[in-house]
Image: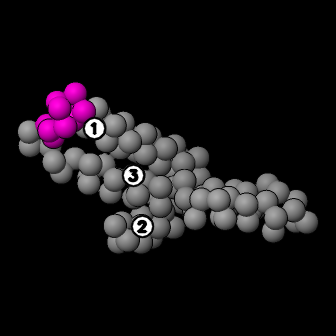
Amino acid sequence: MFYYQQIASLVSALVIDKFGRRPLLIISQVLMTISLTTMGLFFFLKQNNDGVSPEGLDWLPLLSMGIFIFAFAFGTGPLAYTIQGEILPPEAKGTYVNIPVNLYD
């Protein structure tokens, strides 16, 4: 899964100047939503089938997680820190940018 993050970060760095931040964030959020919805649907079907995975869909959670990791590393992950650094005043950057890093990383 580490390679998904590396590839997504590289792609993000290459296309951010061409398309802008907003489309990157929107695409990232949509892909993350689709992947988590798909994974939730898989486990919902599994739970309602007495704990037996839907036939032929054992690969679906792994693919969903890979897409989620790729989408996060593509837009939401790096751009959230960039945008925070630009909107916060200089004297507050160190404190407020550090809070999500410590909470979520």
| Figure quadrant of the N terminus | bottom left
Quadrant assignment, res 45: top left
- Is residue 47 a member of the stretch shown in magenta? yes
Query: 35 and 58: which one is in front?
Result: 58
Camera-side mark, 3 or 1? 1
Q: Is 91 located above or below residue 61 in the figure?
A: below
Marker disc for residue 5? 2
- In 3D space, how far apart are the residues under numbered discs 1 and 2 (Cα atoms)? 25 Å
- Is residue 49 a member of the stretch shown in magenta? yes
Q: Is residue 67 visible?
A: yes
* Type of amino acid under label 2: Gln
SS at mark 3? helix
Residue 56 is left or right of residue 97, and the answer is left
Marker disc for residue 43? 1
Q: What stretch is highlighted in magenta?
A: 45-54
Residue 101 is left or right of residue 68, and the answer is right
Q: Residue at x 38, y 42 (%)?
A: 36
* Type of amino acid under label 1: Phe
SS at mark 2? helix
Badge 3 crowding class, 10 Å Cα cut-off, few under 14, some 14 to 19, many 20 or more, is: many
